Structures are given as C-alpha cells and as structure tokens.
Amino acid sequence: MDHTSEQGFDELYQSALNEIVEVLTCVCKAHNLPLALTWAPCIQQGKSGCGHSNDENYVSIVDPASFVADVEVLGFLEACSECHLLGGQGVVGTAFTTTKPCFANDITAFSKAEYPLAHHANMFGLHAAVAIPLLSDSADFVLEFFLPK
C-alpha cells in the first residue's frame, strides 16, 4: 500500500470511528445502556505486543470508539483494553466469526475459555450483552452493547 492510499484508508477509518461513536452515544442515551464498546481485529488497528496478536482472528476494543454512560463500569472498560478475544469467544467473537448479531442473557455464565472477560463482567454487574457486526470494504467492526442492570 503506498502512502497516498494508506492515508486515504486512515481517513476512512477515522471517519467510520467518528460515526460509530455518534451511534453508540445515541443508542446508549436513548435506551439507558451503561456501556457500548467497538471491537476490531488487532491487526486492523495496528496493535501488537502483549495482549495482542498479528493473527487476524484476534480482536480488541477500539478505545476511542467506546461510550461509557455509567462510570461504575469504567473498570470493565479498562479490563477490555488490556485483553483481546479470539474469534468465537463471547458475543463479540461469535459475531465476528458468524458475521451475525449475537445475544447472551448472562455473559457471566461463560467459562474463562468461552469468554475471558466473564469474571470482570460479573465484578461490574454486567450481564446481558448484544454484539452487532459492521462489515465494510475498508474495515470490520463489532459493536457491543451491554443492557441495563
């Protein structure tokens, strides 16, 4: 990819993130949701090193494209920031793998292998979650919404 096309991709990516933040904000405020996260492949975000992988099957949150309505769940956001998920793990990994929306009534019931953040979700009182994939030519995302306590 040459510099011009790389810059164009960066602008499209940033534009998509800005629109995603607007959507997350509106949905959370309209439905009184405590938290919404945006996930993307680690490699798509250029994340590597501890907690990330160049394997396209690993996803992590896009920190600037998340919305926290309830400050009591900030610790969960921080735990998510330090972790990545493998395709198939939790509602997010399942949404990435199947490219279909995924819902779980109680994410804390998953084992650590099924969803490494289950313990953290339980600590912060987060139970029901829905993940919705957004797929495009330039980038793939999954929006994860946590339902009210």
Image: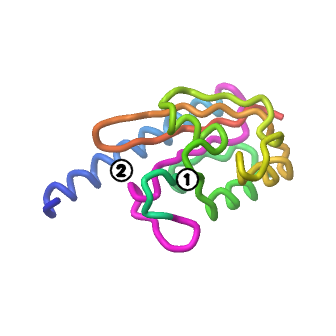
- Of all residues, the one furthest to the bottom in this rendering is 49
Q: Residue at x 25, y 51 (%)?
A: 9
User: The C terminus appears in which quarter of the rendering?
Assistant: top right
Identify the element where label 2 is drawn: helix
Of tags 1 and 2, the one toward the viewer is 1
Q: Residue at x 13, y 62 (%)?
A: 2
Label pair 1/2, CB-CB below 8 angstroms: no
Indicate left or right for 18 with 106 as reference: left
For disc 1, the neighbor class at 10 Å (few under 14, some 14 to 19, many from 20) is many
Pointer 1 residue:
61
Q: Position of residue 48 (x, y in %)?
A: 46, 69
Indicate left or right for 12 with 126 as reference: left
Q: Residue at x 58, y 37 (%)?
A: 94
Q: Position of residue 4 (x, y in %)?
A: 13, 59
Q: Position of residue 110 (x, y in %)?
A: 78, 42
In this view, 2 is above or below 88: below
Which portion, as a residue range, is magenta?
30-52
User: Disc 1 or 2, which lies upstream in sequence?
Assistant: 2
Pointer 2 residue:
14
Three-letter amino acid code of the residue under disc 2: Gln
User: The N terminus appears in which quarter of the rendering?
Assistant: bottom left
Q: Is residue 104 magenta?
A: no
Indicate left or right for 31 with 55 as reference: right
Q: Nearer the viewer, residue 108 or 14?
A: 108
Q: Nearer the viewer, residue 22 or 43?
A: 43
Q: Quadrant of residue 95?
A: top right
Three-letter amino acid code of the residue under disc 1: Ile
